[in-house]
Amino acid sequence: MASAEENEIIKTLCQHQYGFLISKIMFSACELGVFDLLLESKELLSSAVIAERLGTSHPEMQRLLEACVGLKLLRMERKDNEGLFGNTDLASLCLAKSSPRTQYYFMKFLSDIVYPTSQYLTDAVREGKRQIQSAHATAANDLFGAVYSTEERLQRFSIAMGDAWCLYGQELLSAFDLSCFQVVCDVGGGNGTLAKEYISLYPKATVTIFDLPKVVEGAKKQSVASEECQISFQGGDFFKDPVPEADLYILARTLHDWDDDTCEQLLTKIYKACKPGGGVLVLETVINEDRTGPLVGQIRSIIVMLLTEGKERTESEFNALFNAAGFKEIQSKKGNNYGAILGRK
């Protein structure tokens, strides 16, 4: 018989080798509407009923549901020798599209863009270049290009990028006392999810979303700017156009898309726009100084490598960028999933 240590090794191997399927099971259940149906039903449903209401094959749906139970995305109770399914708290909170803290659109981004592109990770390491534009990554390239090809798909991408702030926004915005910053500009702020979190914490503040014109147009249509006119939108390219005047500039999951020189260029531009006492708040994954973790940061580092020219950074690497741009008063705090770095002029 294998020793306890060998059994643990084999268990770890099994978890890792099927990791890609674990993700796809969750993505597929999201896309098929399983979690939305169970949230709306307010009662446990059989696999046959779920399959009928969602227009899928019953035997295959049952297998998917059982796998979701194993992953603790669903719960199952047996009645009259039949399995009845319902959401776990995780599914109702994060995976149902109708939840106010849903991660549905980010799951779609991972499934449609990151998942197929990840097939070319070996090539990315061999060639030393991102794979989203690689000639042999045609399928992934077409998918990613589609994100930007129409206004509708660009909005979906923008919403997906904002999903994280429904879960982590208040935690990060509470890392420092930002009450002195009443005029805020969220650079690349998408549909305004993070801006709404800022307003909820600092009700006297106003936030301007500065993003590409098409993103701004879509965000206005979604009526995100309904916080008593405290959230406004301005279209532009933050590399080419002047940034709006503000006491605080926020860069949330923006710097990881760019190399150090480009990040320094953007931070320098913001530093020059800042008045004395003003600042910039960067929200990003922060890698440990010894680069041993956290695992979620290392995984995101792989995603960034596949899709962009940027990287995830350590606290000291962020400090170097801030210093090069002119910011001297720098504070950093790590949250559960992201870090917050505040620089003052």
Image: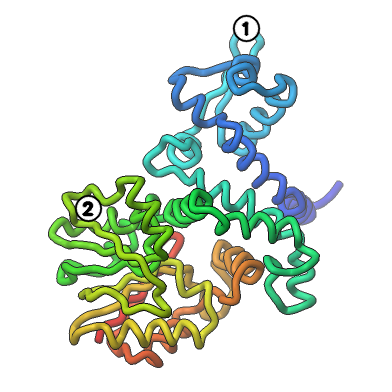
Residue 290 lies left or right of residue 137; in this view the side is: left
Q: Amino acid at mark 1?
A: Asp
- The vertical placement of 162 against 279, above or below, is above
Please rate how many residues cluster around mark 1, counting C-alpha atoms within 10 Å: few if below 14, some from 14 to 19, many from 20.
few
Residue pointed to by mark 2:
200
- The vertical placement of 197 against 129, above or below, is above
Q: Residue at x 24, y 83 (%)?
A: 274
Who is closer to the viewer here, 158 or 9?
A: 158
Q: Nearer the viewer, mark 1 or mark 2?
A: 2
Q: Residue at x 59, y 37 (%)?
A: 31
Who is closer to the viewer here, 89 or 199?
A: 199
* Residue at far right of view: 1
Residue pointed to by mark 1:
80
x, y percent for residue 52: 63, 16
x, y percent for residue 42: 43, 20
Q: To which quarter of the image does residue 277 belong?
A: bottom left
